Amino acid sequence: MTTIDTAAITVVLPEAFDERWSRLPGIQVDGRRITIDPAEYFFRFESSSWLVADWELVKSQLLEVQETTKSAVEQLALDFIKAHAESTSDAARVLSTAYEVYAYLFRDDHLAGLGLPQITAEHLRMLREAATLMALNKVELDGHISNVGPCWFFPAATSVVFDLSDEMGGMLDEVYHGGWFNEHRRIESIKAHAALGGRLVHGCQSVPDQTGGVVAPYGASMAAFRDDLAAFKAGWIEQVYAHRVSPAA
């Protein structure tokens, strides 16, 4: 039987995170320093290895490459991952890489093009923080979901941490998974997520139903992923909401 390393995960990121992340079990935020106790934080933690590629390399060798009639953007990303990604058991490296990915994908100059005037730069910061933590979630090639933390359930986690109403939590989720419906953003997302060794996949429809997102390796079984997710979703969402400090307005 493989023993999973459940030692505390500590990372210092370029931007201070909201201290209210500490409302969730197993996570402490002290400015730019985040400490996670895997045994408390995760609902399921079966793997302490992740696939990552250097973000600077993604920026210089992938972000500006254009797809052609012979090479789709997904193939470009897959080829890049094959050439440059490596397995790491350093969760801090995963979080640092994820921070760079989401600082790029949720940058403030996206605001004008979203068509959602109620979404502000502050909301994009919330997205950057939650998505960074989400990067520790993991799906195996056979579709089994090996790591699940509270940020899998995006509206629930952000409502607890940021005191968002259900309506605003859902709106934030719309921006989060808008990359599936806006082709320009989808292409950006596919390229950027090569730094995290895969592509962002989602269990939701267009209306948020808390089915979450995760960076899954290319080739992972989506049928098995869907079935595994359906089996655990409801109970764990309830546990996340239990940490609300007060009912959201």
Image (cartoon, rainbow, N blue to C red):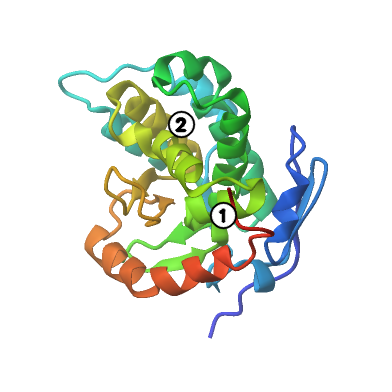
The residue at 34%/38% (across/down) is 78
Q: Is residue 179 visible?
A: yes
Residue 171: where, in percent of width, then height?
A: 44, 38
In the rendered structure, which amino acid carries the disc numbered 1?
Answer: Ala
Q: What residue type is labelled 2?
A: Ala
Q: In this view, does 176 lie to the left or right of 223?
A: right
Asked which secondary structure carries label 1, the reply is: helix
Labels 1, 2: front one? 1
124 or 142, which is in the foreground? Answer: 124
Q: Determine whether 7 is above or below 61 in the image.
A: below
Dividing the picture into quadrants, the one containing residue 181 is: top left
Q: Nearer the viewer, residue 189 or 140?
A: 189
Which residue is at 40% across, 45% downward?
Answer: 198
Res 57 label? none
Q: Residue at 53% across / 39% down in the picture?
A: 53
**Position of 50 relative to 26 (above/below):** above
Is residue 203 found left or right of 33 in the rendered image? left
**Residue picked out by circle 2:** 192
Is 3 situated left or right of 195 in this image? right
Q: Measuring 54% from the left and 51% from the top, which residue is drawn there? A: 134
Residue topped by disc 1 = 157
Q: Crowding at label 1, few (<14), some or many (≥20) Cα neighbours within 10 Å?
A: many
